[in-house]
Amino acid sequence: MKSVVQQLVIVVLALILAGCAGVPRRADLPAGPTPHTIYLVQYGWHTALLLDGASALAHSKKLAADFHDTRYLLVGWGDGEYFVSEHAPWSKAVKALVASDYPALQVGERSTNPPLGAQARDIVALAITEHGYQQLVEYIDRSIAADAGGKPIYLGTPGEHPDRFYRATGNYSVFNNCNSWMSDALRTAGLPVSSFNLTARGVFEQAERISALQQQAGAN
């Protein structure tokens, strides 16, 4: 119990420090043409990416093997047990923070933007380069764990949930959660997001600033 309390204290301090993260500057925006638009979506404490389906499947052989002709793809990362369960108890959420067994990558088809469960205020558009988009999709592909034969490891039963869940690479913890994964994804795509983000709000607010800077640059 003492170790759990210590970790929670550290998290609180980390969140305070995260508020001091550097503000993105216009000079840090991706250089060159930005033909691709991706969308950061906030669902409470969780963040996900909404990608154009045709572009994502054209760049990813792994996703193209499981999805076809979808308008959008929603992608997120989280604890394997809690994330995959449709109605997971809070005990699993607590366990995920301190003793996660493995992470999972969620990928699902969506027909609308904003996607189901989100409103316009929960989503922000971000423009990235062709190189940045390729790097982002490769990052997503690397997040899908493979078995000894190189095949993706699927989690859960498709009939229980409309989305596809893959066993993911990496280790989930209080200091390496869905928002940390998202920060790395956005940085991989060439966006000036702080490398230290533990909360959905922290990631989302930085994305909002970047989006505003991109709109200002486009208007000039």
Image (spheres, rainbow, N blue to C red):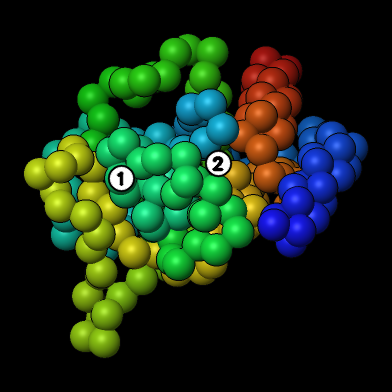
Residue shown at 26%/87% (left/top)? 148
Asked whether, in this view, residue 45 is left or right of residue 104, the answer is right
Return the residue found at the far bottom: 148
Residue shown at 44%/66% (left/top)? 102
Q: What crowding class fits label 2: few (fewer than 14 Cα within 10 Å), some (14-19), or many (20 or more)?
A: many
The disc, 2 or 1, on the residue closer to the chain's N-terminal end is 1
Q: What crowding class fits label 1: few (fewer than 14 Cα within 10 Å), some (14-19), or many (20 or more)?
A: some
Name the quadrant containing residue 108.
top left
Q: What is the count of numbered marks?
A: 2
* Residue at image mark 1: 85
Q: Which x, y percent locates residue 189?
A: 57, 51
- Determine whether the residue tagged by mark 2 lies in a helix, strand or loop: strand
Identified by mark 1, the residue type is: Ser
Q: Which x, y percent locates residue 145?
A: 36, 71
Q: Is residue 63 visible?
A: no
Name the quadrant containing residue 70.
top left
Which residue occupies the foreground of this view, 160 or 66? 160
Return the residue found at the far top: 120
- Determine whether the residue tagged by mark 1 lies in a helix, strand or loop: loop
Residue shown at 37%/55% (left/top)? 81
Name the quadrant containing residue 151.
bottom left
Which residue occupies the foreground of this view, 85 or 198? 85
Residue shown at 55%/48% (left/top)? 94
Which residue occupies the foreground of this view, 74 or 99? 99
Say above or below: 187 vs 204. Answer: below
* Residue at image mark 2: 128
Q: Which x, y percent locates residue 72?
A: 29, 34
Asked whether, in this view, residue 199 is left or right of residue 119, the answer is right
Q: Is residue 72 visible?
A: yes
The residues tagged by marks 2 and 1 sit, at their Cα atoms, a distance apart of 33 Å
The N terminus: image quadrant: bottom right
Asked whether, in this view, residue 25 is left or right of residue 31, the answer is right
